[in-house]
Amino acid sequence: MARGAAKKTFLKPLGRDNPVFAQILGICSTLAVTGKLENTVVMCIGVIFVTTFSEGTLSLIRKWIPARIRMMVETLVIATFVIIVDIVLRAFYPDIWRQLGPYVGLIITNCIIMGRAEAFALNNPPGLSLIDGLASGLGYSYVLIVIAFFRELMGTGQLWGVQILGDWWTNWTIMVMPAGAFFMLAIFIWVVKGVFIQEEQHGK
Amino acid sequence: MENSMIPVAVFFAAVFTNNILLTNYLGMCSFLSVSKDLKASYGLGIAVTFVMATTSAINWAVYTFLLEPFNLEYLRFIVLIMVIAAFVQLVEMVIERVSESLYAALGIFLPLITVNCAILGVSLFMVIRDYDLITSFFFGLGSGLGWFLAILSMAGILQKLKKARIPRGLEGPGITLIITGIMAMAFMGFSGILTIG
């Protein structure tokens, strides 16, 4: 039973309940770094770390959090983990840290983390909350990694800084501009929703 | 550029060329959910502009006089977000006491603002770019107005779109994002007039 619940918790945010295309939550801070795949992956690892451990921590102390100031407590816990990510990045990957600029700090206001903490971590035991945090982080990350993949490939002809496409490729400058990120996300949502709609029609 | 002109330049750059929403992707969550409603967009826009301008000035003071002298820069995330949250709470209480009608119009938007990434984003940009007090204030004001402009035009466009036939998969956030992209392209036309970095 416990294993079944854990599996269900893990799979839910990866599929239909994905925070990005089900609710369009929390794209603010991370959409900005999808111009380069490398930055996106680093950022996503940061987000996964923060979601997992802040949900776990909040779930551990959930019985002692007064309901009235729970938002403050949530923000504090999340901010603590974001500071850890910030310090680690600054120490080991100073170049990437500089490129990410303020967006590492903006993980704090990422609505997904706060939303999952409110909706899940405050009502569930720590083990399940850890799994839910991990899965939400992963579900969120793969959408952004797909977007970053296409943006970097089409915008610069490179992947991870390595030239992939040959001379015949003309760079789509629009893809590295901010507008490209909006279009890519819209197309991604369109495709995913199209698949869901078809599934529903087949189901009937 | 003359020193006295910097705040003005930063102000216009924050509204047009470096629009916080269209070039920095900040404040998307509330933008996507609130822009369906023109009246609500108006209220939220005013609240965001006000809070952004004041918190960027307050956060500048807190950062310069509290964090820097004691080498506590690494605590900036916690401190800045706490200042914003406390300030929003304070404003809410003051408005409730002072004006019933203003509270009815703006009250529901204030809690939303604490989690608006754009507010914290403005404060973080200000720290990274080393602005002084006046510049920070104008940067916050300009970013707020820029966000206001973006959400208001989006709400207007979406109202016109209500009767349009949109592909089913694109309904809701999809079409909003596409329009945002087109708006971002339109705003790219301003680029080159001014730069801030």
Image (cartoon, coloured by chain):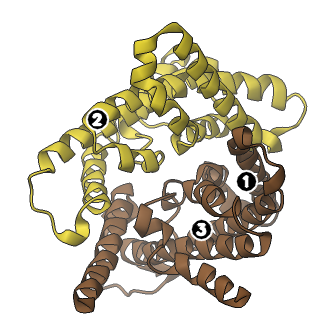
Foreground residue among B161 and B73: B161
Q: Colour of chain A?
A: brown
Please say whether residue A29 is visible from this viewpoint: yes
Q: To which residue does mark 1 refer?
A: A78
Left or right: residue B195 versus residue A58 is: left
Q: Which tag is nearer the camera, tag 3 or tag 2?
A: 2
Labels 1 and 2 share a subunit: no
**Residue B41 occupies quadrant:** top left
The subunit letter for the residue under badge 1 reads A
The residue where tag 3 is placed is: A39
Residue in the image at 64% along x and 31% along y: B84
Which chain is yellow in the picture?
Answer: B
Residue at image location 72% in from the left, 49% down from the top: A74
Query: Separation of disc 1 and disc 2 at Cα?
Result: 32 Å
- The Cα atoms of the two marked residues, 3 and 1, are separated by 21 Å
Q: Residue furthest top?
A: B98
Q: Quadrant of the C terminus of chain A?
A: bottom left
Q: How many marks?
A: 3
Horizontal side of residue A77 vs B93, given as left or right: right
Q: Nearer the viewer, residue A203 or B133?
A: A203
Quadrant of image for the N terminus of chain A: bottom right
Query: Disc 3 sits on a residue from what chain?
Result: A
Percent across and percent down for residue A159 are: 50, 80
Circle number at residue B11: none
- From the image, tell me which residue sits under label 2: B152
Whether A107 is drawn above or below B124: the answer is: below
